Amino acid sequence: MKDKIILFIIGVLVGAIISTGAFYVYTTTNNSNNNNTNNSQMTVGNPPSNQNGQPPEMPSGNNTQGNQSSSN
């Protein structure tokens, strides 16, 4: 009975070491892949806006955020 308990504890420790190593490898390879793709897709600057600081009007004319007083 004592042998089975020791074997179980050793199995749990070996499993924990293997899973920790696999998680470490996964995170390091995943981070290096993300750094390469994020750097090439990163844009710097502000989004486009008109002179009033508002976003540009939609091409269809359905801009619900724009100034609605001009329709009077």
Image: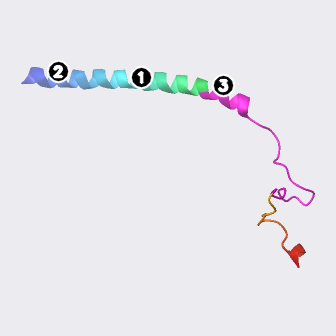
Q: Earlier in the sequence, mark 2 or mark 3?
A: 2
Q: Nearer the viewer, residue 39 or 25?
A: 39
Amino acid type for the residue under numbered disc 2: Leu
Amino acid, disc 3: Asn
Give the residue displayed 60% in from the left and 25% down from the top.
Answer: 33
Q: Nearer the viewer, mark 1 or mark 3?
A: 3
Is 49 part of what is drawn in magenta?
yes
Q: Which residue is mark 2?
A: 7
In the rendered image of this protein, does residue 1 appear above or below residue 57? above
Mark 1 highlights which residue?
A: 22
Residue extent of the magenta highlight? 34-59
Relative to 55, is 7 on the left or the right?
left
Q: Residue at left 78%, top 65%?
A: 65
- Of badges 1 and 2, nearer the viewer stands 1
- Residue nearer the viewer, 28 or 38: 38
Query: Which circle's residue, 1 or 2, is located before the other in the chain?
Result: 2
Q: Tag 1: Cα neighbours inside 10 Å, few (<14), some, or many (≥20)?
A: few
**Residue extending furthest toward the right:** 51
